[in-house]
Amino acid sequence: GAVVSQHPSWVICKSGTSVKIECRSLDFQATTMFWYRQFPKQSLMLMATSNEGSKATYEQGVEKDKFLINHASLTLSTLTVTSAHPEDSSFYICSARRPAATNEKLFFGSGTQLSVL
Amino acid sequence: KNQVEQSPQSLIILEGKNCTLQCNYTVSPFSNLRWYKQDTGRGPVSLTIMTFSENTKSNGRYTATLDADTKQSSLHITASQLSDSASYICVVSAGTGANNLFFGTGTRLTVIP
């Protein structure tokens, strides 16, 4: 079946540094990928929609300059948390959509736990 | 307002027992409803997806039902196993774009021996 790979699975960084998270669709082309943020015991919150070859669409309240998204190919989207601060510590998850003949298929990556010291 | 509400928030059951998780939604227009299992520190994994015309779908020991009239869905887990301990998330789609997805807050299931 379709697989979405997310890397790294966890990262610890110092405050003020930038962290890049990769999301790859391994066996299908994803024109659209999605980035979510999840706090402990809460559900996923959509941060932005990543469109291949164009600018990402950010949800209200999400800082574009803080969370840089690049979708340079049909199989790769990256999320860069710039100048990370402790409040950015969270679980980040990506998903990719594979259009199907019947139902639209949405697959999630395994998530990245970011801890900013 | 588009909302997805799940109950209970948490549930503890003995290994081998059955359980049923509930999902009520007010999302419109309705496209499909999905149940995901999310292990701690992992991404969600799809269990079932149902469209308007489907009222039941099974995936092994997991059986989802959908009543589009009352806008309710349930996920029934049969003969629970310790590995079923996870959060179960109900997600309702209001269209073809994933940016039209509405997530429930999940039910945290703990299966104890």
Image (spheres, helix red, strand yellow):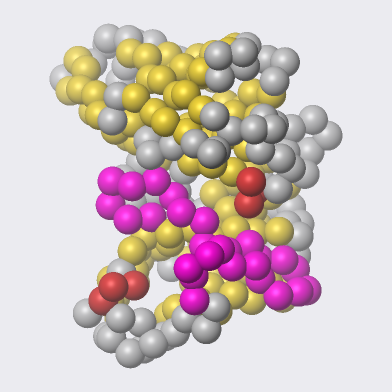
- The quadrant the C terminus of chain A occupies is bottom left
- Left or right: A50 as drawn, with respect to A17: right
Q: Does A45 appear in magenta?
A: yes
Q: Nearer the viewer, residue B12 or B79?
A: B12
Q: Residue furthest front?
A: B1
* The N terminus of chain A, quarter of image: top right
| Residue at x-position 71% and y-position 40% | B95
Q: Which one is in front, A19 or B21? A: B21
Q: Which residues are magenta?
A: A38-63
Q: Position of residue B27 (x, y in %)?
A: 59, 33
Q: Main secondary structure of the magenta part?
A: loop
For the question of whether residue B83 can be seen, the reply is: no
Up-down: is A11 above or below A65? above
Residue at the extreme left = B113
Q: Quadrant of residue B54?
A: top right
Q: Residue A99, image x and y in percent? A: 77, 44
Q: Is residue B5 among the parts visible in the rendering?
A: yes
Can you say whether B108 is above or below A114 in the image?
above
Residue A77 in percent (x, y) is at 63, 69
Is B55 colored magenta in this rendering?
no
Q: Quadrant of residue A106?
A: top right
Residue B91 drawn above or below residue B111: below
| Residue B32 located left or right of residue A42 | right
Tell me how many marks there are: 0
The residue that appears at 38% across and 55% down in the rendered structure is A38
Q: Position of residue B44 (x, y in %)?
A: 46, 43
Q: Please give the name of the residue rendered at 28% of the width and 73% of the height, measured from the top-left corner.
A: A87
Residue drawn where x is 56% and y is 63% of the image: A59
